Image (cartoon, rainbow, N blue to C red):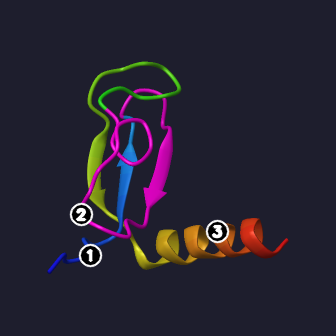
Amino acid sequence: MPITPPAFTLVCQFCSWKKTFLPGSDVLVQNRNQFTHCPSCNTPLPHRRTATPKEVLKTRLEEFLTLHG
């Protein structure tokens, strides 16, 4: 049975690009929820960390507004 992983945030240490992901499954798709390079400055390997509750709330709100707005 698949286990949903916790929300995570990717952060670029060089240009401060940041994006929070709320994965629906443990499948990672390149350039959708898995990045080997920063999409902004092309620096390799953005830092991955657990998302804060505030980041999760913001991302959920953005997703809701995109679907219902």
**Residue 37 appears in which quarter of the rendering?**
top left
Q: Give the residue type that dot 2 points to.
A: Asp
Residue 1 placement, left or right of 12: left
Q: Can you identify the residue that label 3 sits on?
A: 63
Of callouts 2 and 1, the N-terminal one: 1
Q: Residue furthest left?
A: 1
To which residue does mark 1 refer?
4
Residue beneath the point at 34% across and 44% down: 29
Q: How far separated are the C-alphas under marks 3 and 1?
A: 18 Å
- Tell me the element at label 1: loop
Q: Is residue 20 magenta?
A: yes
Query: Which residues, given as a range, are shown in magenta?
Result: 13-35
Task: Locate residue 58, reporting x and y percent.
Answer: 60, 71
Labelled disc at residue 26: 2
Residue sitting farthest toward the right: 69
Q: CA distance from mark 2 to mark 3?
A: 19 Å
Residue 4: image location, x then y, percent: 26, 75
Q: Main secondary structure of the magenta part?
A: loop
Q: Residue at x 29, y 30 (%)?
A: 36
